[in-house]
Image: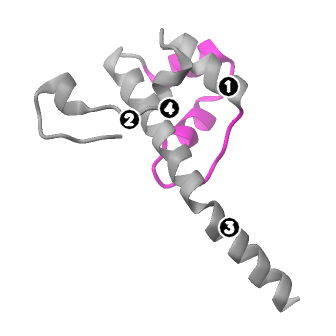
Amino acid sequence: MKKKADELQQELMEQLPELQEIKKIGQRIAFYRKQRHMTQQKLAERVHISKSYLSKIESVGTDITFSLFLLYKLARALDLEAYQLLVPINEAYLYGSPKVEI
C-alpha cells in the first residue's frame, strides 16, 4: 500500500508543470473577463456552467482541470481565439507597467 501511495505522489509531481500551466489559463480567463467588465456569473451563464465552477477554474490555488471543449466555449464567450488563453499575456504591453506575464 505504501508503494502505491509513493507511486501516486511521484506521478503527481511529474504532472506539476502541466497543472501550473492550467492554473495560468484560469488566470488568463479571469484577466480577459475583467478586461471586458464581465462578472463570473455572466460568463458562466454564457458557457452553461455554474459560477462556482468558473470561480474554481479562475482560482490560483485550485488543481481543477477542464476540457478543451470548455476552453473553446470560454474563448468564444470572451470574443477571443482559443490560443489566446494559452499564451502568456504581457501586461507591460497592455498597460505600460513592469513586465508581468500570466
Q: Nearest to the eye among marks 3 and 1: give it.
A: 3
Secondary-structure class at tag 2: loop
Identify the residue at image location x=85%, y=82%.
4
Q: CA distance from mark 4 to mark 1?
A: 13 Å
Residue 88 lies in what quarter of the image? top left
Residue 78 pos. (x, y %): 48, 14
Residue 10 pos. (x, y %): 69, 76
Q: Which residues are magenta?
A: 39-67
Q: CA distance from mark 3 to mark 2?
A: 24 Å
Residue type (three-letter) at the residue carrying disc 1: Leu
Task: List the residue tagged with mark 4.
Answer: 86
Residue 48 lies in what quarter of the image? top right
Secondary-structure class at tag 3: helix
Of the numbered discs 3 and 4, the one sitting upstream in the chain is 3
Secondary-structure class at tag 4: loop
Q: Nearest to the eye among marks 1 and 2: give it.
A: 2
Crowding near the residue tagged with mark 2, few <14, some 14–19, many ≥20 C-alpha atoms within 10 Å: few
Task: List the residue tagged with mark 3.
Answer: 12
Task: List the residue tagged with mark 2.
Answer: 88
Residue 28 lies in what quarter of the image? top left
Q: Image quadrant for the C terminus?
A: top left
Q: CA distance from mark 2 to mark 4?
A: 7 Å
Residue 84 pos. (x, y %): 46, 23
> In the rendered structure, does residue 21 fall within the stretch colored magenta?
no
Crowding near the residue tagged with mark 4, few <14, some 14–19, many ≥20 C-alpha atoms within 10 Å: some
Residue 44 pos. (x, y %): 59, 22
Task: List the residue tagged with mark 1.
Answer: 70
